Image: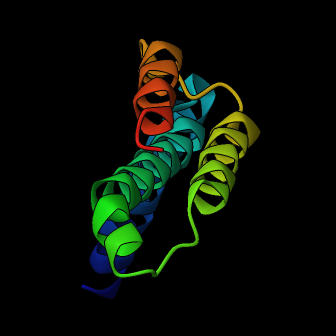
Amino acid sequence: MDYLSNGIAFAALLVAGAGLYHSTKQGKLTQRPVKLDAFRITKEFLIYCSKYRTMYTFRQVTGTRDLWSEIDAFAWNIEKLGPTGIYGLSHKIEEIVKKAKKLQ
């Protein structure tokens, strides 16, 4: 009985190792965190942009200097990620930055 459970565990380990090797070989494991980071950075920036007018009204931001620093930080963080493998991301980033510049 003990040999059977050890054999099943070993077979499961081999299958998991083969799957890990195959997915790493195709680059799926290395691209997923980059895509999630790009999504997270974009989401946080869009939330900031949606709250900018309210923060400006209540004097939580000093004006366009804060907005421009956020725009630069957003562009730099996305650029720092390198190639993400997301189709059309560069065009969307350009569009987001243009619309954010109109907030000032």
Look at the picture and state if 29 lies above or below 85.
Answer: below
Figure label count: 0
Q: Residue at x 40, y 69 (%)?
A: 56
Q: How is the image coloured?
A: rainbow
Nearer the observer, 76 or 1: 76
- x, y percentage for residue 13? 45, 61
Quadrant in which the N terminus appears: bottom left
Q: Residue at x 60, y 55 (%)?
A: 70
Viewer-closest of 26 and 76: 76
Instruction: Judge whether 88 appears above or below 71 on screen.
Output: above
Quarter residue 83 falls in: top right
At x 60%, y 45%, the residue is 71
Q: Position of residue 48 (x, y in %)?
A: 39, 61
Q: Residue 69's x, y, as percent?
A: 68, 55
Q: Residue at left 64%, top 49%? A: 68
99 or 23, nearer to the observer: 99
Q: Nearer the viewer, residue 60 or 43?
A: 60
Residue 85: give x, y in percent of width and height.
52, 21
In the figure, is residue 10 to the left or right of 1? Answer: right
Left of 70 or right of it: where is 89?
left
Q: Quadrant of residue 31?
A: top right
Among all residues in the image, which is located at the extreme bottom? 2
Residue pushed farthest left?
1
